[in-house]
Image: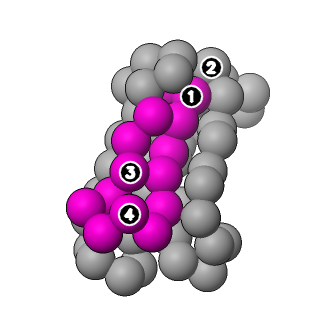
Amino acid sequence: MKIIVNKIKCKKCGDVIESKSVHDFKFCKCGAVAVDGGQDYLKRCGNREDWEELSEVER
């Protein structure tokens, strides 16, 4: 699996956050969710029901 885009949308504040490189850890503006990993891995922080997955992967 190859990660093309690593991003999520926070359902609480509507912020779309993207991790562009390894250890590029980003929180949304309300702090409910975070994304990390760039194109190396998909890491999420927060409650699963609080984000919408927007990542794109190539299989």
Quarter of the C terminus within the rendering: top right
Q: CA distance from mark 4 to mark 1?
A: 18 Å
Marks 1 and 3: which is nearer the front? 3
The kind of secondary structure element at disc 3 is strand
Residue 2 position within the rendered picture, expressed as x and y whole percent measured from the top left: 65, 24
**SS for dot 2:** loop
Disc 2 to disc 1: CB gap under 8 Å: yes
- Residue 35: percent from left, percent from top: 50, 45
Q: Disc 3 vs disc 4: Cβ atoms closer than 8 Å?
A: yes
Q: Which mark is residue 31?
A: 4
Q: Residues within 10 Å of mark 4 (few under 14, many from 20)?
A: some
Amino acid under label 1? Gly
- Which residue does the numbered mark 3 point to in the structure image? 27
Question: Which residue corresponds to the image point at 60% horizontal and 55% vertical from the top-left?
Answer: 45
CA–CA distance in space, label 3 to label 4? 6 Å
Tell me if 34 is positioned left or right of 37 in this view.
Answer: left
The magenta region covers 25-38
The earlier-in-sequence mark between 2 and 4 is: 4
In front of the other: 58 or 19: 19
Q: Is residue 36 left or right of residue 49?
A: left
Is 57 in the magenta?
A: no
Pick whichever of labels 2 and 3 is earlier in the sequence: 3
Q: How is colour applied across the structure in the image? A: one colour
Q: Which residue is mark 2?
A: 40
Q: Position of residue 14 (x, y in %)?
A: 27, 74
Give the SS element for disc 4: loop
The kind of residue tagged 3 is Phe
Percent from the top left, x then y, of residue 39?
54, 22
